[in-house]
């Protein structure tokens, strides 16, 4: 073998090794016969680059080969991503090629979300492309509407302040300033009052604690009394009281109906008249005994007779001995 041929073979081997090494570093094994190529379309690849990792369920199965603009005029501006898989894992055409953040330090990878329903995907097929927002993108997407609303609010507030400034003249502004100063004085007075109240509470803390303890003791005593009353046979007492009231009502009904001595006294006018007359005669008898005691107790050595009863003198309360 000539020296030139040996040199050519060595150069060819070096070139082949360099090509294989370059593709190997890119994640592509040119000697693998099971490599499959797929495509996905995106409006925004969010930083995905060529040679980015392709995974299925977290396992690296391939890499992104090429990213170009879609040549279709109807899809102008969309990005066409070509990626290859060195794994024979099968999934359907309904699977999703989702771009996701590789980590907090940046970078994007491509994940195949496999779907097993439908026709099996073959090399050259298109998969549905989606993008998973990272933390900062999600926060930015949520804050953007809030920022827009806040800007609108600030514009309206600015307009309102300008309108107020135009509406209020110097006197009104001075009056508003005085009102603000007066309000500040009120706040100062309230703060002073609160400090005085706090100082008063601190000075009387012991008395307040004693009062609270006394209140607690009174509450406990009332609770104990209530418990004692609950334990007492109040039901029997109430029943006895009701029975007594019924008996009294019966007695009153009997008196009203003229039963018994009190009933007759209350309902019989004749008995009342007789009692009245008896009382009157008793009164006259007592008056006669007082005015003429000798008529009832007579004692005389000489046989002198007592004077007879005189009704007129008795009515006049005059003695018959005069």
Image (tube, grey):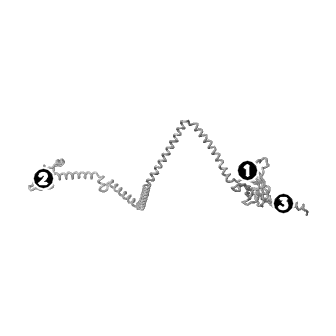
Instruction: Provide residue 210's location: percent of width, then percent of height.
Output: 42, 57
Classify 10 Å Cα crowding around label 1: few (below 14), some (14-19), many (20 and above): few
Which marked residue is nearer to the observer: mark 3 or mark 2?
Answer: 3
- Does 16 sit above or below residue 163? below
Instruction: Provide residue 181's location: percent of width, then percent of height.
Output: 51, 42
Instruction: Provide residue 216's location: percent of width, then percent of height.
Output: 44, 58
Any mark on residue 14, and which?
3
- Give whichever of 313, 218 is nearer the camera: 218
Kindly report the distance in space between the C-alpha atoms of the residues bearing marks 3 and 2. Answer: 184 Å
Which marked residue is nearer to the observer: mark 2 or mark 1?
Answer: 1
Secondary structure at badge 1 equals: loop
- Give whichever of 212, 230 is nearer the camera: 212
Q: In this image, 259 relative to 88: left or right?
A: left
Any mark on residue 44, and which?
1
Among the two numbered marks 3 and 2 on one chain, the one whose residue lies closer to the N terminus: 3
Secondary structure at badge 2 equals: loop
- Give whichever of 136, 198 is nearer the camera: 198
- Does 6 sit above or below residue 130? below
């Amino acid at each position: 073998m000539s020296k030139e041929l040996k040199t050519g073979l060595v150069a060819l081997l070096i070139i082949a090794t360099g090509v294989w090494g370059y593709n190997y570093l890119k994640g592509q094994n040119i000697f693998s016969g099971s490599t499959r190529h797929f495509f996905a379309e995106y409006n925004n690849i969010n930083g995905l680059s060529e040679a980015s990792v392709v995974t299925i369920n977290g396992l690296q199965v391939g890499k992104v080969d090429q990213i170009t603009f879609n040549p279709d005029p109807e899809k102008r501006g969309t990005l066409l991503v070509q990626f290859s898989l060195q794994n024979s894992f099968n999934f359907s055409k309904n699977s999703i090629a989702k771009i996701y953040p590789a980590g907090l330090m940046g970078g994007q990878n491509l994940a195949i979300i496999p779907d097993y329903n439908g026709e099996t995907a073959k090399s050259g097929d298109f998969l549905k492309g989606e993008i998973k927002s990272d933390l900062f993108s999600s926060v930015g997407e949520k804050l953007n509407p809030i920022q827009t609303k806040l800007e609108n609010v600030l514009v309206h507030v600015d307009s309102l302040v300008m309108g107020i400034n135009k509406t209020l003249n110097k006197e009104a502004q001075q009056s508003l300033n005085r009102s603000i100063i007066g309000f500040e004085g009120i706040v100062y007075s309230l703060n002073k009052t609160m400090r005085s109240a706090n100082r008063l509470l601190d000075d009387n803390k012991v008395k307040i604690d004693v009062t609270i303890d006394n209140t607690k003791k009174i509450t406990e005593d009332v609770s104990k009394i209530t418990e004692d009353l609950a334990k007492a046979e109040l039901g029997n007492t109430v029943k006895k009281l009701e029975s007594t009231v019924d008996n009294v009502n019966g007695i009153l009904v009997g008196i009203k109906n003229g039963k018994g001595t009190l009933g007759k006294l209350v309902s019989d006018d004749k008995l009342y008249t007789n009692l009245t007359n008896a009382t009157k005669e008793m009164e006259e008898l007592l008056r006669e005994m007082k005015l003429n005691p000798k008529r009832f107790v007579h004692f005389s050595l000489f046989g002198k007779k007592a004077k007879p009863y005189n009704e007129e003198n008795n009515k006049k309360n005059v003695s018959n001995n005069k």
